[in-house]
Amino acid sequence: MSIGDWSHLLDGVSKKQYFVKLLSFLNEENFHNKTIFPPSSEWFMAFELTSFSNTKIVILGQDPYHGYGQAHGLSFSVKDNIKIPPSLRNIFKEIEDDLGITQSQNGNLTAWAEQGVLLLNSVLTVEKNSPGSHSNKGWEIFTDSVIKLLNNDKANIVFMLWGAYAQKKSSLIDQNKHLILTSPHPSPFSAHTGFFGSKHFSKANKYLESTKQQTINWKL
């Protein structure tokens, strides 16, 4: 397993005991004809599109969308021509309010990833129609190690942690080296309690500018 300049993290992972057990679990699910999202070719899409050296912002999700054709390896993102899920629609609403950018009618966030926004789910796979089904199988160990690597080996990253689950990851991040932006989750159940009006997207760009980094064009 080697994906660009993430290889110093990913090389050797496949031999670690937790990862061997994780792959064994996934193979067993496949053997029993369970449908897993996203397809295996897209499990590491976030790392393929956003290099370690180019990572400026991390938007942390929990696990992939569990509906057919939605997930493609980027947190909150869906493939072209797929209906925009409610949380992503609320993200677009906040971007419009924050930056005046008209809401996108396309939920594919690849353009963000290519600019240095690591769209990282804590768990990288899920069984069809069964949210959380692949939690505590080993993915969290892997993605926590990604966060630790970014924290230790880079400076001035913006971590967007939305909701209680994502905010637990703040314990892995040095706030003296990086910017942590927290708010309620953009889901319809909680967006009105503080996600709307958080202005994370303009705050992120101001921070990038102040640390002499290229800002993100959030328009899709």
Image (tube, rainbow, N blue to C red):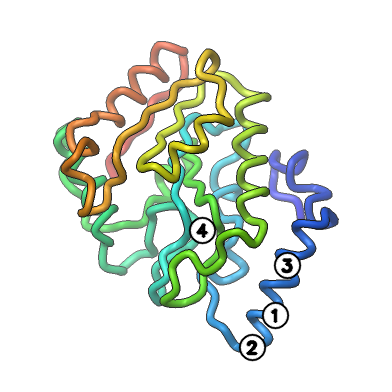
Looking at the rendered image, the quarter that the N terminus falls into is bottom right
Residue picked out by circle 3: 23
| Three-letter code, disc 4 | Gly
> Where is 71 relative to 184, above or below?
below
Q: Nearer the viewer, residue 158 or 172?
A: 172
Residue in view at x 71 percent, y 64 percent: 22
The CA span between labels 4 and 1 is: 21 Å
The CA span between labels 2 and 4 is: 23 Å
- Element under label 1? helix
The numbered mark, 4 or 1, whose residue comes first in the sequence reads 1
Disc 4 versus disc 1: nearer the observer: 1
The numbered mark, 3 or 4, whose residue comes first in the sequence reads 3
**Do callouts 3 and 1 mark residues in contact (Cβ within 8 Å)?**
no
**Do callouts 2 and 1 mark residues in contact (Cβ within 8 Å)?**
yes
Label of residue 73 in the image: 4
Residue in view at x 71 percent, y 77 percent: 27
Residue picked out by circle 1: 28
Residue 80 appears in which quarter of the rendering? Answer: bottom left
Residue picked out by circle 2: 32
| Three-letter code, disc 1 | Glu
| Three-letter code, disc 2 | His
